[in-house]
């Protein structure tokens, strides 16, 4: 029997890796994948607790998260395509038009 | 029924001013309007006022009633209760009688004087507005409403002095008049406020003030009486606030005749008479007023002997005559003072209008010697001018004699022999400088024949009427020693004026003295100026010619220090202290803002990290506070 703590630990690891990915990577695709990883970490957490408490509500939320993530993927990909078309690059650091600070 | 007519005395010229204003706007914006329409509106409204006043006067004569009309409550805050109401008692109806009458004549005169002027319509709009303000002042039932009129005439005077605002001198003269008057007005306002606080919980109408005046301590009465007189000093051009009056002659001559001779400048005298119940209780201030009047009269007369500008001579003579009026009201002879206001309105308006006729005929020449050099043959103006000069010099039976003699007798009877002597000497000077002007302008030989110049009927007709007034006005208040019935003294009986009750012998002697003095002045002027070579004019030099350097003294005492302080505040306090503080703080904020703006650097990953940190903090906080 794998303990609840292990599940929680894995999902937290997934979330943290995703978060660090979002912060540290430059490529928009990788950032997107990291966001998906964070979502999946949360999903795993929810499913675990659903099983543990014999309550189906978290499972329903998980299904909703997955379906919304699918819809989000479509928008995300189209936005990435548009960004690429305008700058011929997917490096996040060059999209600084909205910067308020001194231009680097 | 007829009480509702009272307010129409004021409303008629006010509506006339409004109508002329709109017509003038139409005239300059859309379509030219003939001068005749402006003139028609401008002259009919004073006539309406005069006829209403006459009607009320006759009614009062018959039924011995007082008109009072309450229009609306203007302000009602706790203790302060200001009613917009007008009072037509003997004094105010007497004042508005000659204000509207002389005003009407001068309006007619102005048609001829202002002919073909670009601002014809504007002039009549201002002129009617002035008359309305003056009538508000005269008919007011409480000091606050009086103050509205008081300020109104000041504004109109300002607007009309700089009527030709293209000339910088005129603008400066108007500013001077306005600023000097503001000093006086401030005093007046303070006086009213003092009175209000002294009296406490009452409405401020003259009737209630009079009824409650005994409850006020004498110190407060003296303070408020003095402050009110400061207002009169400014408005009526007395020492030390007289400096604006000679400069005010920059305005067109009808203005000088109506505002700066006949009506507005006498507002101070009227005000003192209006507050007679106040001033009769404080004889110290009354004596002070009398002395200010006496010295103003003397001072102005001395200056006038050396002036060369025809209008300035008349301006100084106005100031001098106002001094006489203040001698009378200061000593408590209110009706005598107002009698002089009355006769003075006639002959001085006439003198100004005559001078205006000469000035127009000679294309705006005001120097008396130059006028003499290019003398024009103006028989009607010459004749009326002579009448005016005789009247002001105090030769019987012209009106000036009776009113001036009454004032001299009043000073004598009160035992104020110094004032009496000053006034007598001033009478001598008055005769001298007025005839100096007359002899130079009309008599002194200039070795060439003068051409007859036609003068417009609208100029000569009012002169005729005023000449009749200047001759006859004195008979309205003939002293009993000459078989008169004191009509004006009786009419103004409710002012508690003192009356002259010298024995007949003294009165005859006084009259003889004043006539002899005046004749001496005329003789001196005759011997000196009737054969004067007008091609060698006198200059305004020397101590007297420079008006005792009073303007220069005031300039260095008040104007220059004010300028210096203003420059100091502008250059040092404003830029170096206040501006520096504000600029420094704003620069600081800009720098802080720049630092904060570095957070918004459009780096998405940085945003994400920031969010994460924030959320972590929130969760830690929740964990701690909720104690999970």
Image (cartoon, coloured by chain):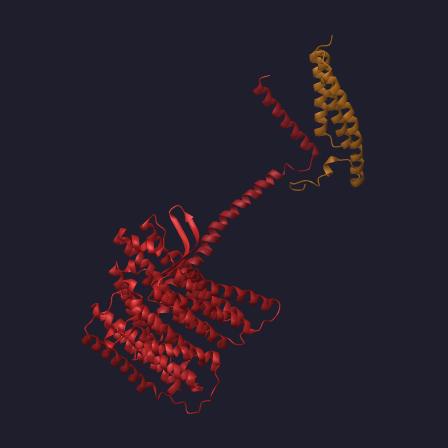
Q: What's the residue at 33%, 78% (across, down)? A: B391
Q: Chain B is drawn in which colour?
A: red
The residue furthest top is A1
**x, y (%) of residue B219?**
26, 53
Left or right of B545 on screen, residue A56:
right
Residue B178 seen? no
Name the residue nearer the viewer: B234 or B126.
B126
Could you say which quadrant of the image residue B381 lies in? bottom left
Q: Is residue B362 above or below residue B276?
A: below
How far across and how far down the image is residue A78, in percent?
Answer: 80, 34
Q: Position of residue A10 (x, y in %)?
A: 72, 17
Rendered image quadrant of residue B278: bottom left
Picture colour for chain A: orange
Above or below: residue A7 compared with residue B396: above
The front one of B378 and B102 is B102
Residue B116: quarter of image: bottom right
Q: Is residue B411 visible?
A: yes
| Quarter occupied by the N terminus of chain B | bottom left
Q: Nearer the viewer, residue A88 or B68?
A: B68
Left or right of B610, for residue B427: left
* Rendered position, B205 above or below B358: above
């Amino acid at each position: 029997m794998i303990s609840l703590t292990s599940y929680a630990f894995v999902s937290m690891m997934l979330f943290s890796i995703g978060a660090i990915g979002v912060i540290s990577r430059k490529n928009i695709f990788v950032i997107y994948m990291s966001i998906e990883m964070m979502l999946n970490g949360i999903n795993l957490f929810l499913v675990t607790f659903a099983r543990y408490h014999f309550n189906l509500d978290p499972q329903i939320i998980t299904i909703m998260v997955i379906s919304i993530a699918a819809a989000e993927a479509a928008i995300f990909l189209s936005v990435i395509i548009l960004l690429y078309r305008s700058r011929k690059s997917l490096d996040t650091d060059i999209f600084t038009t909205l910067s308020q600070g001194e231009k680097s | 029924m007829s009480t509702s007519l009272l307010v129409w005395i004021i409303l008629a010229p006010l509506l006339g001013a409004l109508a002329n204003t709109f017509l003038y706007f139409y005239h300059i914006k859309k379509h030219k309007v003939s001068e005749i329409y402006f003139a028609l509106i401008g002259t009919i409204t004073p006539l309406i006022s005069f006829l209403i006043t006459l009607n009320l006067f006759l009614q009062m004569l018959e039924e011995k009633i007082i008109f009072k009309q309450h229009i609306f409550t203007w302000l009602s805050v706790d203790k302060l209760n200001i009613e917009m109401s007008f009072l037509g008692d003997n004094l105010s109806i007497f004042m508005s009688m000659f204000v509207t009458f002389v005003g009407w004549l001068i309006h007619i005169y102005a048609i001829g004087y202002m002919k073909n002027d670009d601002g014809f319509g504007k002039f009549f709009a201002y002129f009617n507005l002035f008359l309305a303000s003056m009538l508000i002042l005269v008919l007011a039932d409480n000091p606050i409403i009086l103050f509205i009129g008081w300020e109104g005439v000041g504004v109109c005077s300002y607007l009309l002095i700089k009527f030709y605002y293209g000339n910088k001198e005129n603008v400066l003269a108007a500013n001077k008049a306005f600023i000097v008057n503001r000093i006086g007005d401030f005093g007046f306002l303070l006086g009213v406020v003092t009175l209000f606080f002294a009296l406490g919980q009452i409405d401020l109408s003259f009737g209630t003030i009079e009824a409650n005046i005994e409850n006020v301590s004498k110190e407060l009465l003296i303070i408020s009486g003095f402050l009110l007189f400061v207002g009169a000093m400014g408005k009526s051009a007395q020492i030390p606030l007289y400096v604006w009056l000679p400069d005010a002659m920059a305005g067109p001559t009808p203005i000088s005749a109506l505002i700066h001779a006949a009506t507005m400048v006498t507002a101070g005298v009227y005000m003192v008479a209006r507050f007679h119940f106040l001033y009769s209780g404080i004889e110290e201030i009354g004596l002070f007023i009398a002395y200010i009047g006496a010295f103003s009269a003397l001072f102005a007369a001395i200056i006038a002997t050396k002036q060369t500008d025809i209008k300035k001579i008349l301006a100084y003579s106005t100031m001098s005559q106002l001094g006489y009026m203040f001698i009378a009201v200061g000593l408590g002879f209110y009706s005598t003072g107002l009698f002089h206001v009355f006769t003075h309105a006639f002959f001085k308006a006439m003198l100004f209008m005559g001078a205006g006729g000469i000035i127009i005929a000679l294309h705006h020449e005001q120097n008396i010697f130059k006028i003499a050099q290019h003398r024009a043959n103006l028989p009607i103006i010459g004749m009326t001018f002579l009448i005016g000069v005789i009247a002001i010099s105090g030769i019987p039976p012209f009106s000036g004699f009776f009113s001036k003699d009454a004032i001299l007798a009043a000073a004598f009877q009160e035992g104020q022999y110094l004032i009496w002597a000053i006034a007598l000497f001033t009478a001598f000077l008055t005769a001298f400088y007025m005839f100096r002007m007359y002899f130079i302008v009309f008599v002194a030989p200039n070795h060439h024949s003068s051409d007859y110049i036609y003068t417009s009927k609208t100029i000569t007709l009012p002169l005729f009427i005023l000449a009749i007034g200047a001759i006859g006005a004195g008979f309205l208040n003939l002293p009993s020693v000459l078989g008169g019935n004191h009509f004006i003294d009786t009419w103004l009986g409710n002012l508690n004026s003192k009356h002259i009750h010298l024995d007949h012998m003294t009165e005859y002697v006084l009259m003889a003295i004043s006539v002899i003095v005046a004749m001496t002045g005329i003789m001196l002027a005759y011997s000196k100026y009737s054969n004067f070579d007008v091609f060698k004019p006198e200059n305004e030099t020397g101590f007297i010619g420079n008006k005792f350097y009073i303007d220069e003294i005031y300039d260095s005492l008040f104007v220059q220090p004010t300028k210096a302080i203003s420059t100091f505040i502008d250059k040092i306090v404003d830029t170096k202290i206040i501006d520096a503080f504000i600029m420094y703080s704003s620069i600081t904020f800009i720098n802080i803002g720049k630092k904060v703006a570095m957070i918004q650097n459009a780096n998405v990953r940085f945003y994400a990290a920031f969010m994460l940190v924030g959320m972590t903090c929130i969760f830690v906080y929740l964990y701690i506070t909720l104690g999970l």
